[in-house]
Image (cartoon, rainbow, N blue to C red):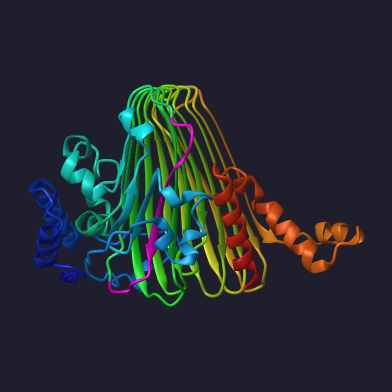
Amino acid sequence: MSTQTVLPIGRQYIEEAAGKKNEPSWMTEFRLQALELAGSTELPKLEKTRIDRWQLDAYGTYKSQAKLDSPEQLPAAAKQLLPEGAASGDNLIVQRNSGAVWAKLSGELAAQGVIFTDLETAVREHGDLVKPYFMSCVKPDENRLTALHAALWNGGVFLYVPKNVRIEAPLQALFLADDAEATFAPHVLIVAEANSSVAYVENYLSGDDLEMVSNGIVEVFAKPGAHVHVASVHNLGKRSTGLVYRRAIAEQDARVEWVIGELNSGNSVADIHSVLKGNGSSSDTKVISVGAGEQKMNLTTRANHFGRSTPSEMITRAVMKDEATAIINGITKIEKGATGANGEQTERVLMLSRRARGDANPILLIDEDDVKAGHAASVGQVNPEHLYYLMSRGIPKSEAHKLIVYGFLAPVISEVPLEHVRKQLQLLVERKLEQ
């Protein structure tokens, strides 16, 4: 006996929303096919996490957004996430709830053939570039969450870097949710052609009182010799449910670097996956998370080695306080034929209360002999000897405690490519720890 799945959206909703956005027919048809998949696929089965008990239906509806005349019109909390002197808004995309309200690329980069715009615009104006890549890295049929995303995504980012173009200054996106009735499901698509280089930084922000589901996907395609650096900081409120899949495919001699700050205050699922497809390709993934209250988090980092001589490194550090729970998974898969691969991973969880829970699960799956692989995992509380040492140097206990926690997270925070984002990340960590 089968149970009928009741979806939060229907066919009519998709058709009406597509009409409002003047969307090309191929994308609308794609959405409708994904909706059918959502009705027949299951929720992902996550390690020790029952997301079927979470609030997963608060998607809201598509609501068009008024464009900004300047980023200065943003709420104060959102403006703090922008770099100093950002009044011009160059190299910045802002999505507010269901759609982009600001998208601007500098003339210098535009003259080099760089495309940096919201994905809805890119679908209309650059469909030949978007269509071959969209939802080909993260497939709609993987589970119900990916199918629903493919059906209802909105706003988003499309970043295209032509061959041999090296962008020095990071490009930035801000995703702001402040309307509980509006769908919030950004899709980020990055295509870096051969021997190009780019850094992309994004921030997610919502209020504590906003009951919502954020269902996001990031897809990165690094062509031969390309270097892509992605930094992402999520700071959604206590009544939010944050769901995000991040995935990259690196071709020959390409490199993908992830720096992730999962600082949501509500329940969260994050999956970061690097596929080392080409010989000599490499990846580096660093993740930090801070959990508080009764928050539940499931964070997974993955590296799949297909090419020869492919190094990967994954580091995850989570701090849990109160009754928060974190399931931290690291999965390194070395395929047959990936000779010379080297996969290293570390998962560490620091618990600041007796009721907090952490679970670190390092997994190595190796189908080739001529490789190197290693893992380290730890779950524990603040070392009293470390605390005593700092206090013996005249540092008050509360300050010593903070220093130990910040030092625990420092290897990831220091890797954020923008100074103002790095400072903001430090501030968010401090706020969560002091709540």
Quadrant in which the C terminus appears = bottom right
In the image, is residue 340 above or below residue 365? above
Residue 142, how many percent across, how many down?
27, 51
Q: Nearer the viewer, residue 52 or 136?
A: 136
Q: Nearer the viewer, residue 153 or 36?
A: 153
Snapshot quadrant of residue 148: bottom left
**Residue at point 49% right, 27% down?**
341
In the image, is residue 267 above or below residue 29? below
Q: Nearer the viewer, residue 138 or 88?
A: 88
Q: On the picture, is 281 further left or further right than 120?
A: right
**Residue at point 31% right, 63% down?**
184
**Residue 180 within the segment the image draws in magenta:** yes
**Residue 32 within the segment the image draws in magenta:** no
**Residue at point 34% right, 23% down?**
163
**Residue at point 69% right, 58% down?**
405
In the image, is residue 308 above or below residue 357? above
The stretch of residues the image draws in magenta is 167-181
Snapshot quadrant of residue 130: top left
Q: On the picture, is 419 further left or further right than 161?
A: right
Snapshot quadrant of residue 281: top left
Residue 353, how many percent across, how many down?
67, 71
Quadrant in which the N terminus appears = bottom left
Which residue lies most toward the bottom here? 209
Q: Nearer the viewer, residue 203 or 320?
A: 203
Residue 90, how many percent across, how many down?
40, 44
Q: Give the tally of numbered discs.
A: 0
Residue 15, how many percent across, how many down?
9, 61
